[in-house]
Image (tube, rainbow, N blue to C red):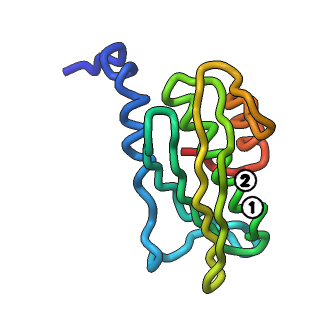
Amino acid sequence: MSLNLTRIAPLAPGLLAGLAACAPSEGQDSRAEPGKIDYRGVETRLLDGDLVEFRVALSGEGAGEDAVSDYAQCAAAQYALIRGYGFARHVRTNVKEEGGIWRADAVYTISPALPQGLKTIDAEVTVGDCADRGIPTV
């Protein structure tokens, strides 16, 4: 039996989007190296059309408000690319810390063209920057 990749490749974006909702449970053992940020997963929820919510969590040395906000932005950028869009615009991010775990609840709009506003991101450039910085995406 042979595997026909031309039939599987078009399914990849949908499969990746489905996996985006998977996140480790809070009680799961961390496998992060000492002194490194432990990225604990992304939950993605489509709110309305092009409005998407991202819930992310992280812990470890270097964790904080900026790190968890960057993690959410990286997830938003990758999600935009998965959906076939090139841009996202930040709407809001709520951050909290409890027991050493930083969480962000961020909302972005995604679009095929550069949206109006001050907090816009080029998804492809942002995903590349995230990879360079070692921040996982969706």
For residue 38, above or below residue 114: below
Residue at image point 65% right, 78% down? 97
Disc 1 + disc 2, Cβ < 8 Å? yes
Residue 120 found in image quarter: top right
Residue at image point 79% right, 70% down? 62
Q: Residue furthest top?
A: 6
Residue at image point 51% right, 30% down? 82
For residue 62, above or below residue 129: below
Q: In this rendering, would 9 be left or right of 84?
A: left
Few, some or many C-alpha atoms within 10 Å of disc 2 (few <14, some 14-19, many ≥20)?
A: some
In percent of width and height, residue 45 lies at 44, 48
In percent of width and height, residue 85 lies at 57, 24
The residue to which callout 2 is attached is 70
* Of 43 and 110, the residue lying toward us: 110
Using the image, tell me which numbered label, if any, was put on residue 137.
none
Q: Mark 1 to mark 2: distance in Å?
A: 5 Å
Question: Which SS class for mark 1?
Answer: helix
- Please state which amino acid type lies under the numbered disc 1: Ala
